[in-house]
Amino acid sequence: MKVKAILVLVVALCVAADKPKVDAKKELKSLQGTWEMVGLEVNGETVPEKKLAGTTMTIRGDKYIVKVKDTTHETRLEIDPTKDPKAIDMYFPNGTELPKLSKGIYELDGDTLKVCRHQTPGEDRPTQIGSSPNTNLFVVTWKRKKK
């Protein structure tokens, strides 16, 4: 009987330990597609909508690809939807060196995605969505592009 109880406990722990990976995969799958930038706040200042026009972001697999006019920026991302707030890590290419890590947070509400992080990699993860003067934080709001 003890062996059976221990076996049940081990299986339950394995399933519980694997759950965050499953949740992250499911959440990442829900982020796939193309998004349009509809809002940007930097250091507490709202960027005018006309400056955002035409800026898109595509999530394909673990790639976060932003296109601004004729320029494309690609990073690798990892998410952890089990954190509160949800965590997003973005790895920026850095030549032949290891990628630079930018720790952020995100909020997904239907077809609206908000990402908050520092403007430069290497800073601590923000604790809430928002920015204020002299924080070096920005919040970008994306709206899922209609097919």
Image: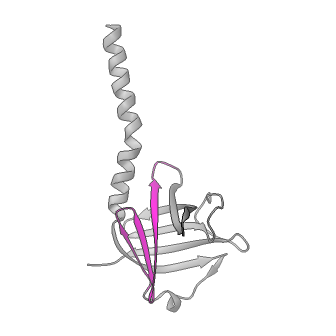
Image check: 137 left or right of 87? Answer: right
- Percent x, y of residue 27: 37, 56
Residue at image x 46%, y 48%? Answer: 82
Work out which quarter of the rendered image holds the N terminus and state it. top left
Residue 131 falls inside the magenta stretch: no
The magenta stretch spans which residues? 55-83
Residue at image x 35%, y 33%? Answer: 15
Work out which quarter of the rendered image holds the C terminus and state it. bottom left
Q: Is residue 56 above or below residue 28?
A: below
Residue 48: name its quadrant.
bottom right
Q: Main secondary structure of the magenta part?
A: strand
Residue furthest to the right: 134
- Percent x, y of residue 109: 41, 64
Residue 64 falls inside the magenta stretch: yes
- Scheme of colours in the image: one colour
Q: Is residue 117 above or below residue 78?
A: below
- Percent x, y of residue 106: 50, 62
* In front of the other: 3 or 38: 3
Residue 14: name its quadrant.
top left
